[in-house]
């Protein structure tokens, strides 16, 4: 069994580690490139959302490199993600690939629906062994998120453009190689140190912007045109509303044992949206309100083109922005998105925020 | 004077209007439906909606504005989350009351009761009774209204299964449909197929060409269920499941000569459901499929030409 999986930001580091620890032969998909996108777009439904298309590119490239088993997550809707795997499987079968697809679905009633699939994947491994592997993977996800959050604070203040990104990538490299929870903790410390050593201008005044939107588009830099890096290097301190660790805790762990996660976001959204709409539409509305309350200078909303839950949010967000007094810009991205137009719109948005800030100081 | 309740002639109107009408009538309200779709109504909706919203949502917003201009006392705009167990409607229906409120200015009171049969059956029932109490009627009357709604809805659905389209029934046309010499399945959301403006009169046009039209409403629930049996995972959208089940059932039965798939541009669920349907049909290579994607820019001439060519092709195949 040669296992592969789709990319989503740094997630591959944790998944690759986890599957390796489980004693599986892993063929991670090659890093996402233009070619990945071209392949994915060519073989996906035209109006499918961008994440599905990138997934397809990942699968095709990994299968071409010898993978024969795909591990994919599922869902119960109403967001399209819950039906990705079924469509992707049919397309890959029509393309003539010979493979197995293991879809990990959130349990609908019985936990055994999920554990059976895990057992299928792990074969003869004992439960304690599996638990240890999961524990280390969880540690890694949390460590990566901590390093990421720190990099977002350092980048806008760096003296030499690119230093932060280099240190960040080095830190991730360290984590990639950590095989035990103890090693992961040590790497986390080292990684944070690397970032802390980046020469910065401490008293620099920076804009603070929150990023909201659909999880894949927020987490995958190739899909969001390196939004965080671009903003950071323009001197903006970015705050990300969604982290993988957060998502795992709320959607996989807490919800599967019947507990609801943090209610803050939903409470904040209540005057504008009172019901979940699938995906991250509800959170997008709530997080915007929260960023406004926390005194952020602006919010950037990212969604994949044709994402219905985010379109619901998009219909509501202009009112939220006006009433809460926080400027907001929405980027609907897919394979057609041009970098130049994107940068221009971002720059114009930042100019507006700067002006607003100066006026506030004067007024 | 009685209270006037406005119901937009869009989205779920084609699924549930008879039930809704009976409910409000039983409560002593006057029901006012928005006008038939016109270019002006659609244009208004396009202006009010965000660019990326799908055509049916834009149209819905246009119909809300139409009702506002008719000065109705309130508008029935329910949040329909689920109408059966473990199934949802498309995400847009889950946030529809808010989309309406924040996109269309100066709307009258909105009756935005939540319908969630999957997770909140009891609360849904209570919510409806509470809604009924707003019309100043005793509780017994409210329960009567619910029963009347259920009866009217059941009669409507029974009639659909006799081969009438929602439009046939809502317009009280009673002549038997069909009788054409080619049988074509027309698969798509009722709110697209039955709005004669945005569907460019698709169903009527096909019938004029001598085509016997089958839609998913005309199939029995068991047939739709049988159709979805071969799927590895149940589809969690009610309408997606119906489309898929109907398409697969008709494919297995082999009693149709062709299928027209109608999707609106950018429709999330359809982008996956229609892809699956097309793949099944293409693999078997028995029944030709015509895919029509419609939005507010679709030109009528192009659609008509393609339809005519498709029906001609089906006739030639039959002749050979």
Image (cartoon, coloured by chain):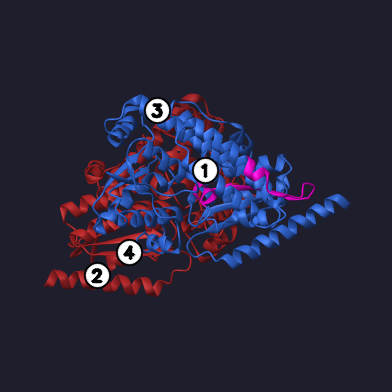
Chain colours: A blue, B red
**Mark 4 lies on residue:** B291
- Which mark lies nearer to you, 1 or 2? 1
Distance of mark 2 from mark 3, alpha carbons?
Answer: 60 Å
Image-based side of B181 in relation to A305, left or right: left
Residue A174's mark?
A: 1
* Residue occupying image coordinates x 21% and y 59%: B283
Image-based side of B101 in relation to A46, left or right: right
Where is residue B39 drawn, in percent x and y?
Answer: 51, 66
- Which mark lies nearer to you, 3 or 1? 1
Q: Magenta stretch: residue A206 in it? A: yes
**Mark 2 lies on residue:** B311
Image-based side of B284 in relation to A211, left or right: left
- Over which residues does the magenta segment extend? A193-220
In this rendering, is residue A195 above or below B39?
above
**Mark 3 lies on residue:** A131
Distance of mark 1 from mark 4, alpha carbons?
Answer: 51 Å
Where is residue A290 drawn, in percent x and y?
Answer: 67, 39
Q: Magenta stretch: residue A300 in it? A: no
* Residue occupying image coordinates x 39% and y 75%: B301
Within-10-Å neighbours for mark 3: few <14, some 14–19, many 20+: few
Image-based side of B113 in relation to A25, left or right: right
**Could you tell me which chain the residue with mark 3 belongs to?**
A
């Amino acid at each position: 069994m040669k296992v592969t999986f789709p990319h989503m930001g740094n997630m591959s580091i944790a998944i690759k580690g986890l599957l390796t620890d489980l004693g599986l032969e892993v063929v991670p998909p090659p890093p996402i490139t233009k070619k990945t996108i071209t392949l994915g777009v060519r073989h996906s439904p035209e109006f499918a959302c961008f994440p599905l298309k990138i997934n397809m590119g990942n699968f095709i490239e990994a299968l071409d490199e010898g993978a024969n088993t795909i591990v994919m997550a599922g869902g119960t809707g109403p967001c399209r993600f819950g039906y990705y795997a079924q469509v992707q499987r049919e397309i890959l079968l029509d393309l003539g690939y010979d493979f197995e697809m293991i879809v990990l679905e959130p349990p609908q009633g019985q936990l055994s629906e999920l554990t059976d699939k895990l057992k299928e994947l792990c074969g003869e491994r004992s439960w304690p062994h599996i638990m240890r592997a999961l524990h280390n993977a969880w540690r890694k996800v949390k460590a990566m998120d901590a390093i990421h959050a720190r990099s977002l604070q350092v980048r806008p203040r760096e003296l030499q453009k690119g230093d932060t990104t280099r240190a960040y990538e080095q830190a991730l490299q360290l984590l990639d190689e950590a095989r035990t929870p103890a090693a992961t903790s040590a790497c986390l410390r080292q990684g944070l140190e690397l970032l802390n050593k980046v020469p910065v201008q401490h008293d620099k005044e920076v804009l603070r912007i929150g990023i909201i939107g659909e999880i894949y588009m927020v987490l995958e830099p190739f899909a969001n045109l390196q939004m965080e890096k671009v903003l950071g290097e323009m001197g903006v301190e970015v705050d990300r509303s969604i982290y993988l660790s957060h998502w795992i805790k709320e959607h996989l762990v807490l919800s599967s044992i019947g507990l609801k996660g943090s209610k803050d976001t939903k409470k904040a959204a209540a005057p504008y949206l009172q019901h979940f709409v699938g995906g991250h539409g509800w959170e997008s509305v709530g997080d915007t309100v929260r960023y406004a309350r926390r005194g952020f200078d602006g919010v950037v909303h990212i969604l994949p083109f044709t994402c219905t839950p985010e379109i619901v949010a998009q219909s509501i967000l202009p009112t939220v922005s006006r009433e809460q007094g926080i400027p907001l810009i929405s980027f609907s991205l897919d394979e057609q998105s041009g970098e130049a137009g994107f940068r221009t719109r971002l720059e114009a948005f930042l100019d507006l925020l700067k002006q607003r800030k100066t006026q506030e100081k004067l007024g | 004077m009685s209270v006037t309740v406005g119901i937009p002639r869009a989205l779920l109107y084609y699924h549930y209007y008879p039930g809704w009408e009976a409910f409000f009538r039983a409560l002593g309200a006057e029901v006012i439906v928005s006008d038939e779709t016109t270019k002006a109504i659609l244009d208004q909706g396009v202006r009010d909606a965000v660019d990326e919203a799908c055509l049916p949502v834009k149209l819905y917003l246009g119909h809300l504005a139409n009702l506002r201009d008719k000065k109705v006392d309130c508008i029935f705009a329910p949040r329909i989350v689920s109408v059966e167990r473990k199934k949802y409607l498309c995400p847009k229906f889950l946030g529809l009351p808010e989309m309406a409120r924040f996109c269309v200015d100066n709307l009258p009171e909105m009756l935005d009761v939540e319908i969630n049969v999957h997770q909140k059956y009891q609360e849904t029932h209570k919510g409806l009774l509470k809604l009924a109490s707003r019309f100043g009627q005793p509780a017994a009357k409210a329960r009567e209204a619910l029963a009347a709604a259920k009866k009217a809805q059941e009669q409507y659905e029974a009639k659909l299964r006799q081969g009438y389209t929602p439009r046939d029934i809502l317009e009280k046309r009673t002549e038997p449909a069909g009788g054409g010499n080619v049988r074509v399945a027309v698969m798509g959301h009722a709110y697209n197929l039955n709005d004669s403006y945005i569907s460019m009169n698709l169903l009527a046009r096909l019938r004029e060409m001598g085509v016997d039209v089958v839609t998913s409403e005309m199939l029995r629930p068991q047939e739709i269920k049988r159709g979805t049996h071969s799927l590895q995972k149940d589809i969690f959208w009610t309408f997606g499941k119906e489309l898929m089940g109907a398409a697969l059932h008709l494919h297995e039965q082999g009693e149709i000569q062709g299928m027209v798939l109608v999707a609106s541009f950018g429709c999330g669920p359809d982008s996956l459901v229609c892809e699956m349907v097309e793949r099944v049909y293409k693999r078997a290579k028995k029944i030709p499929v015509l895919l029509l994607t419609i939005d507010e820019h679709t030109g009528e001439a192009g659609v008509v030409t393609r339809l005519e060519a498709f029906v001609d092709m089906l006739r030639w195949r039959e002749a050979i």
